[in-house]
Image: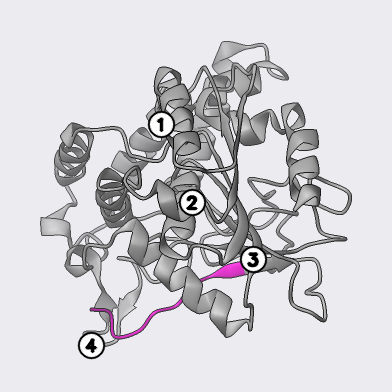
Amino acid sequence: MLPRLELAYETYGQLSPQRDNAVLVVHGYTSSHHAAGRNAKGKEGRGVAAGSVGWFDALIGPGKAIDTDRYFVIAVNALGSAHGSTGPNAIDPRTGKPYGPTFPEITLRDMVASQKLLVDSLGLKQLVAVIGPSMGGFQSFQWAASYPGFMKAIVPSVTAPRAPSGLERLQALQKRLASDPNWNDGWYYENGGIAGTLEEIRFETLMSYGQNEILAETMPDPRAREAAIRANARAWAQIYDGHSLVVLRKAIGTFDITSQYDALRRAKVLYVQSPTDKLFDIALCPGYVSDMRKAGVDITYVELPSNKGHMASHADAALWAPILAAFLKSL
């Protein structure tokens, strides 16, 4: 039980007088609520660097697929994350210290329930859509399962309606974090932190997600690409929290709404996948789609001809932006 819950979020566009044009955008595993635009100098904080461009910026904005001249877009940082929402690096008001290893276990249902509180606080009675990649796709599916009929549609990408099986990755992550010399039974905040270990984890993650392929289009020198990715990982490691990696990984590991397809019948689904994604096996996707259709779900399935792997839905946004724009307008 948390004594206090805060969610960091950004909004883009204007809410209509009828409050009927809201789109909720939810992020992947370690991303933030900064989904669009360039963060202005002086506006840094909550784990978002000054000058940084939103991770879904290619899709959100005036005239873009998620058109902010038409929609009011809310991008929220997930419960348990390290970018401003209540998570392990937040201060526990009962102790005056970060929650750290005492932060409670949460589920995707908990994340979505906290977002529903935010949406309710904004006076919204319905969403046009919930959109997100990776863990954001999990959240999109969970929204439709937890609150059927509240949104007209969901748009999950580079994801699946259930998490890849196995606890091995979680256990390996926990062991690796604990191997840092500053770990101190998880109380590393005043012990020098664990930025070195986080940097290595982030570098490996970016490489496996497809960041090298993204940079190759504008940066032909492999050494320059590696240096750029390492710089990205180093900056991220100064902001992020090791316990958030564990808390969100545990939540991801228990996600499965494949027995709740009936609830999804009240929302249209645009499901977007990447054949080069190393996290989600593309061979399983037609089966998921077939099962959803058998359950009566109105689903459109798109495979992107992208080499960007797990980053395909934002790095190759141009490949499906017209599809997304038409899908949203059809609602």
Question: In this rendering, would 293 be left or right of 180?
Answer: right
Name the residue beneath numbered marker 3: 127
Choose mark 1 or mark 2, whichever is in front: 2
**64 shown above or below 23:** above
Q: Which amino acid, mark 3? A: Leu
Q: Secondary structure at mark 3?
A: strand
C-alpha span from label 2 to label 3: 15 Å
Choose mark 3 or mark 4, whichever is in front: 3
**55 shown above or below 39:** above
| Image quadrant in which the N terminus is located | bottom left
Verify whether residue 194 appears in magenta.
Answer: no
**273 shown above or below 146:** above
C-alpha span from label 4 to label 2: 40 Å
Q: Which amino acid, mark 1? A: Thr
- Residue at 44% of width from left, 55% of height from top? 263
- Residue at 79% of width from left, 79% of height from top? 18
Counting residues from the N terminus, which is met first, the one under dot 2 or under dot 3?
A: 3
Label 1–label 3 contact, CB within 8 A: no
- Which is nearer the eye, 211 or 178? 211
Residue 145 lies in what quarter of the image?
bottom left
What is the magenta range? 1-9
Name the residue beneath numbered marker 4: 94
Counting residues from the N terminus, which is met first, the one under dot 1 or under dot 4?
A: 4
Question: Can I make out residue 85 in this image?
Answer: no
Name the residue beneath numbered marker 2: 264
Choose mark 2 or mark 3, whichever is in front: 2
Q: Which amino acid, mark 2? A: Leu
User: Which percent across, then down, holds residue 179?
Assistant: 14, 41
